[in-house]
Image: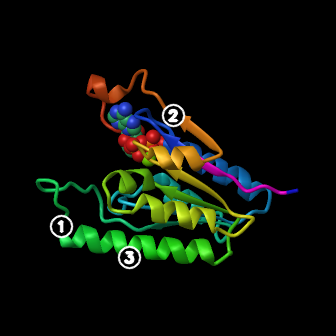
Amino acid sequence: MENSLILVHTGNGKGKTTAALGIGLRAVGHGMKVLMLQFIKGTWHTGELDAVKRLHPDFKITQLGQGFIKSQKGEWSEAVLENARTSWNLTKQEIASDAYDMIILDEINNMIDYGLIDVEEAIAVLKERPKRLSIILTGRNAHPKIIEMADLVTEMKEIKHPYKKGIKAQKGIEF
Ligand code: ATP
Ligand code: MG
C-alpha cells in the first residue's frame, strides 16, 4: 500500500523551503520524480537551483514569481494578479500531469494568505491530485483549512536568527 501525503511547513523560523528540498532529495534517492514550483521567488539565484540541475530530470525547480511582492493599500498590481493566475494555472497542469511523485509548492502558503490563490480552489486541487502524488506546501501563515486537510504539519519557530544581529544572508545557508 502506497500512501501519498499532504505536508505543510509553516511558521516564522528558518527551514521551511530547505526542509522541503531535503525531502525532495530523499525521494529522488528512491527513484521518484520531484518538482518544486516556487511562487513569488524569481529574481534571487539560490544554490539549490544549480544543485538540483545535477539531478535533472529527476528533480526540477521552476521559478514562477517575479521577486518580493507588496500590496499598495491592500491592492495588488495587475502584474502581480496576472502572475498569480499564470502561476496557479501552471500548478494545476503540473499536478494533473501525473508526471511526478512529489510536488513542492514553495511559498504557496503566502500566496493563499495574500488572497492571490483561493484556498477553497487550492483544497479542491489537492484533493483531486493523482493517487501517487505527495505535495508539500511551504510558507508562513498556512491557512487553517490547509492545516486541517494536511496529513503532516510542521511549524518552524524562530528561536534565534543572525539577521537580528545584523548579519546579512549567508551563501550556502540562506541562499
Ligand atoms: P529557508 O529557505 O532557509 O529554508 P524559509 O523557507 O523557512 O527559509 P522564508 O520565509 O521562505 O524562510 O524566507 C526566505 C529567506 O529568509 C531565507 O534566506 C531565510 O534564511 C530567511 N529567513 C527565514 N526566517 C527568517 C527570520 N526569522 N528572520 C530573518 N530571515 C529569515
Ligand atoms: Mg521559504
What residue is shown at x 45% (from left), y 76% (from top)?
89
Q: Would you say the residues marked 1 and 3 are in contact, meaning their CB atoms lie under 8 Å apart? A: no
Left or right of 51 on screen, residue 41: left
**Magenta span: helix, strand or loop, mainly?**
loop
First reached walking from the N terminus: tag 2 or tag 1: 1
Q: Which residue is mark 3?
A: 86
Q: In this rendered view, identify the residue nearer to me: 28 or 110.
A: 110
34 sits left or right of 154 in the view: right
Image vertical order of residue 98 relative to residue 73, above or below = below
| Numbered badge on residue 77 | 1
Residue 175 shows up from this direction: no
| Viewer-closest of 145 and 126 | 145
- In the rendered image, the quadrant that contains the N terminus is bottom right
Task: Residue 62 in the image: state x and y as whole percent.
Answer: 48, 68
From what the image shows, is residue 78 above or below residue 2? Answer: below
- The percent position of residue 110, horizontal first and vertical second, equals 37, 51
| Secondary structure category for the residue under label 2 | strand
Identify the amino acid type marked 1.
Ser
Q: Which residue is mark 2?
A: 155
Q: Which residues are magenta?
A: 2-7
Q: Position of residue 84 (x, y in %)?
A: 34, 68
Residue 32 sits above or below residue 172 on the image: below
Q: Residues within 10 Å of mark 3 (few under 14, many from 20)?
A: few
Residue 6 among those drawn in magenta = yes
Task: Give me the residue at 65% from left, 45% from top.
Answer: 151
